[in-house]
Amino acid sequence: MRALNSRLRRSVLIFQKESAAAVVATERMSPTVLLLEPQPLYRAALSSLLAGSSLTVSVISRSTLDECRETLAESSVDLVVAAITPSLAPRWVLATLAEIHSSVPVLFLGEPTDLQGRIDALRAGGTGALTRDASPEEFMAAIQAALRGRRTMDEALADRLLSTASDLDRSLAQAALSITEREILGMLGVAWSTRAIADARGISPKSVRNHVTNIYRKLGFSSRPEAVRYAARMGMRPVSDELARP
């Protein structure tokens, strides 16, 4: 994937879909956007924003998934914008809508604190995911991108997904670490000092620093805090962690 619009604010990223068969709904005179939002005030605000935009879209708003299904069965819809709530889990929403309209793209809006919900939305096949506190400009950019067959996500979500991919690459690279290096990396993950690691391993602090340098080189780390965070995220712990920590 590659970023397409550098003029957008950094908090929203737009990516080209991998599929070359994406339907560009904006070729129509007036694309139709269906809002699935249970909160009346928020639904009215989004409807007003879309109706008054320069995109010239038709807006249909619904409060429940059942109403959304009925609308899809009766009307031509180019994009669904759906809230992420306990009763509107992304996988359930996508599976339900696919029964009626298998190709309609769905842009999800989640709470800023619900990063996992937005991740689940993309993994389930959503065309994009934004936070509910996105600016009107960010929201409209996401709508336009989705209608053109592009994916959109907020910066926090993109950072997490890229971090996850980086962790996966490094997990595969762990095979290049020696037994001693893996043990030392685990010690770094539970915040052991260089002296503590040296004492536990029965080697000199200089040898520990040499091992740490090799770990950085093999896994692409640039600092000790980065190595510590990685080892902690991956749940790496030293065999010798059962000993009393100095």
Image: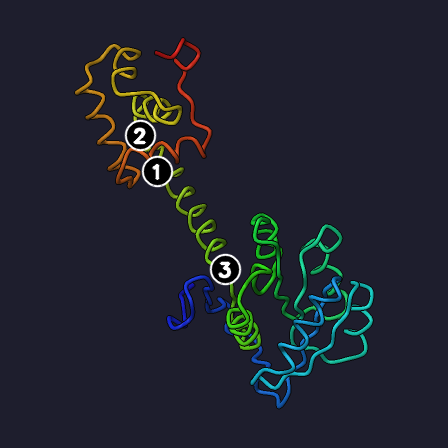
Q: Residue at x 38, y 43 (%)?
A: 169
Q: Is residue 2 above or below residue 77?
A: above
On residue 173, the disc is: 1
Residue, far front: 41
- Residue where numbered disc 3 is placed: 154
Q: Is residue 109 above or below residue 218?
A: below
* Cβ atoms under marks 3 and 2 closer than 8 Å: no
Q: Secondary structure at mark 2?
A: loop
Viewer-proximal residue, 22 or 187?
187
Q: Residues within 10 Å of mark 3 (few under 14, many from 20)?
A: many
Disc 3 or disc 2, which is closer to the eye? 3
The three-letter amino acid code for the residue at tag 2 is Leu
Mark 3 and mark 2 lie on one chain; the one further toward the N terminus is: 3
- Residue where numbered disc 2 is placed: 177
Residue 121: x %, y % from top left: 61, 56
Residue 187: x %, y % from top left: 36, 22
Quarter of the picture holding the N terminus: bottom left
Q: Residue at x 74, y 73 (%)?
A: 61
Locate residue 128: give its quadrant: bottom right
Q: Secondary structure at mark 1?
A: helix
Q: Residue at x 42, y 67 (%)?
A: 9
Q: Secondary structure at mark 3?
A: strand
Lateral position of residue 68 relative to residue 112, left or right: right
* Cβ atoms under marks 1 and 2 closer than 8 Å: yes
